[in-house]
């Protein structure tokens, strides 16, 4: 196995083609400090490059998944400059950098499964909206917290949530800052499944991850890219795109192995 990178705010472990990325600031409820934003991008870019990684599980250490942006970062965000226009430009540059950091979840070609518990607040929603699937335990509670500190959520929540749940519910959550608990998140379609506790959550998500890791990695990467493309284009554009994708990227070797495995009732074996 290729050496897994070491980070100050994340704990990584890779086995059986599954990469675990754990937010690792439990003493701060995994609040996203400046280092974590950068390291998240680095970790997912590494996962994208590493051929041995076929699927990623994102979780959080300690009592909560993630309390959102570390409030200490606001000293850097509230930029002062004698020229207001230059201060505004510096602010936009900073926000764009944060957006780029967490879009790495979306841009990673490997499926990303978020396994969440406890509080999922503010920036944690921005981040996990970019995951392929979201799973929670019964303790999970979501909050678009930005409204309570007088700002407009600006790193992905307001852009991504309307494609995941109803616009009316997005507006209610964003305007009020109220908590949405696990059962409501499931009913709204934000999460795939609610597990009784964290142990069941991790076991259940790993079962899904193992199923994905057992498929043709080339076909999985193509499926993610086609779904992402189709979300932002017309049906006709999506049909054309997938036809071109399969024409250029469908593996005869993988198709033959998948068909043989199906006939022989065994697990397929595919190159990384």
Image: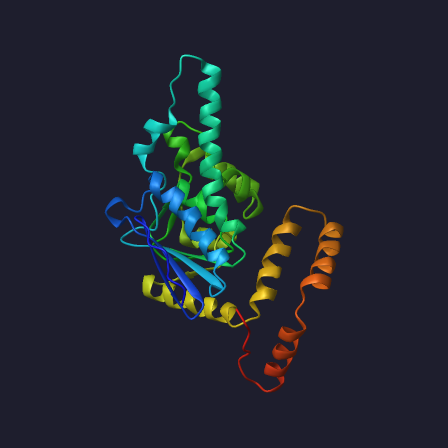
- Residue 59 vs 70, above or below: the answer is below
Residue at coordinates 47% horizontally, 63% vertically from top-left? 53
Q: Is residue 9 left or right of residue 82?
A: left
Residue 68 seen in the figure: yes
Q: Position of residue 235 (x, y in %)?
A: 73, 51
Identify the image's colour scheme: rainbow, by chain, secondary structure or one colour: rainbow
Q: State the residue lying farthest toward the front.
A: 2
- Residue 183 vs 29, above or below: the answer is below
> Nearest the camera: 91 or 170?
91
> Nearest the camera: 152 or 242?
242
Q: Position of residue 22 (x, y in %)?
A: 35, 55
Q: Position of residue 165 (x, y in %)?
A: 54, 47
Q: State the residue lying farthest toward the bottom.
A: 264
Residue at coordinates 48% horizontally, 62% vertically from top-left? 55
Residue 154 seen in the figure: no
Give the quarter of the figure containing the N terminus. Answer: bottom left
Residue at coordinates 68% horizontally, 73% vertically from top-left? 252
> Nearest the camera: 23 or 143?
23
Residue at coordinates 49% horizontally, 23% vertically from top-left? 89
- Residue 217 vs 265, above or below: the answer is above
Q: Is residue 146 left or right of residue 30?
A: right
């Amino acid at each position: 196995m290729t050496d897994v990178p070491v980070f100050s705010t994340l704990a990584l472990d890779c086995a059986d083609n599954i990469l675990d990325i754990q937010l690792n600031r439990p003493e701060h409820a995994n609040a996203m400090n400046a280092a974590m934003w950068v390291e998240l991008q680095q970790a997912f870019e590494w996962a994208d490059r590493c051929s041995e990684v076929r699927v990623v599980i994102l979780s959080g250490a300690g009592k909560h998944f993630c309390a959102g942006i570390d409030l200490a970062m606001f000293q850097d965000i509230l930029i002062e400059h004698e020229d207001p226009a230059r201060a505004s430009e510096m602010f936009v540059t900073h926000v764009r950098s944060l957006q780029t950091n967490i879009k790495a979840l979306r841009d990673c070609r490997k499926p990303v499964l978020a396994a969440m518990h406890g509080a999922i607040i503010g920036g944690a929603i921005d981040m996990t909206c970019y995951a392929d699937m979201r799973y929670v335990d019964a303790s999970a509670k979501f909050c678009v917290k930005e409204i309570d500190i007088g700002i407009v959520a600006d790193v992905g929540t307001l852009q991504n949530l309307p494609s995941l749940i109803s616009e009316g519910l997005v507006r209610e959550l964003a305007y009020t800052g109220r908590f949405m608990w696990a059962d409501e998140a499931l009913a709204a379609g934000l999460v795939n499944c609610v597990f009784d506790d964290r142990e069941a959550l991790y076991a259940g998500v790993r079962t899904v991850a193992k199923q994905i890791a057992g498929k043709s990695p080339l076909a999985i990467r193509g499926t993610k890219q086609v779904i992402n493309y189709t979300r932002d284009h017309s049906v006709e554009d999506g049909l054309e795109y997938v036809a071109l994708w399969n024409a250029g990227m469908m593996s005869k070797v993988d198709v033959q192995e998948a068909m043989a495995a199906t006939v022989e009732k065994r697990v397929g074996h595919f190159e990384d």
